[in-house]
Amino acid sequence: MKKTILATALTTLFAASANAATIYEANDVTIDVFGDSEIVLLNPISKSEPFIVDIQDADFGFALGYKLSEDVVLGSTVAFGVDDASGAAQLDESYVALASEMYGTLSIGKQYTIYDESGIGNDYQFGFTAFYDQTDAGEQVIKYSIDKDVFYGAVAFLLDSGVSDTGASGFDGKIGVRFADFDLAVYHAQVEEAAGNEISNTNVELGYALTESLLLQASYGQTDNDSYTETTDTVGLAAIYQYTPKIQFAAGYANIDAAAGSANDGIENQYYVNTSYLVNDYINTYVELGGNDGDDSQLGAAAGVQVAF
């Protein structure tokens, strides 16, 4: 059944999956249910870590929206995930949102911040890690985003009044522009973590559609963490090739100048290649190889299945 304007707004603005299923729709009210699961056979890059069958996602949730007008939807999303250690369900997101195509979306509650959206490439397990040394979620988040086709932007404030699960506070945001075949975005974050150290991140990301099938991407990121006396600078390159509507190839390389003592200290080069096969709108499969030049490194390998609705 073709989704109405209200259902489309819900799926785009509130739900975690583009394939969310509508289970109720009447009297300007829509309720969607969504979920995802990802199981991976993983041989890690680190030699000291064993081969595992990893459950990386086991999430589900609900989104409810009420159509206030032709352009405005008031709604709420509640999403749960499964804790890897205990196997118990835990609350991942719980927020309310007021969404308008003209004026943007304002959401308040437990949710991801803007930095969760950053990143280049289409990696699965072995993507770039030095770019994103940043808290990107919290229980008390106020977020606003707007997309006007050519220009887009967003900002999120992470509050801490003693009840936050992360104990962090600060803000992050992005501003971007699309022109011709280019997409340029700048991300910035300034967060003070529970331990008191401040982390400042800036990422510049550029995408260029060379052809209808080939997307080239580049990024530069700088992380300044008070815990270290130096900054971490990272340059990344990535390419995504859509061979057929179902088959995709991707590759990426990053050069890292890491702060001494940080998680990426001793790693200068990081890379991955993968291929994926989209079985249908709900199931994706992939194989990926990746590595770096760290002392404890080997060629990592992963084969995974993702199921989403």
Image: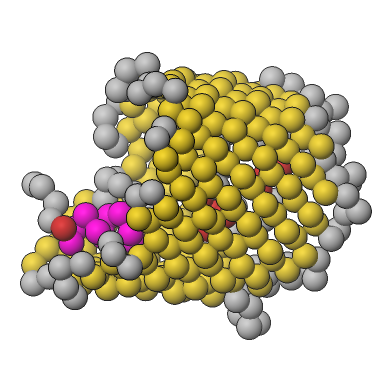
Give the residue at the far front of this rendering. 180
Q: Position of residue 300 (x, y in %)?
A: 65, 24
In the visual, does 288 lie left or right of 188?
left
Residue at 73% across, 67% down: 193
Quadrant showing the C terminus: top left
Give the residue at the far bottom of this rendering. 161
- Asked if the magenta segment contains residue 73, the reply would be no
Residue at 56% across, 71% down: 157
Q: Is residue 139 visible?
A: no
Residue at 37% across, 73% down: 96
| Residue placed most toward the observer, 220 or 11 | 220
Magenta span: predominant SS is helix
| As drawn, 7 above or below 214 | below
| Residue placed most toward the observer, 286 or 67 | 67
User: What stretch of residues is rendered in magenta?
Assistant: 6-15
| As drawn, 279 above or below 15 | above
- Asked if the magenta segment contains residue 11, the reply would be yes
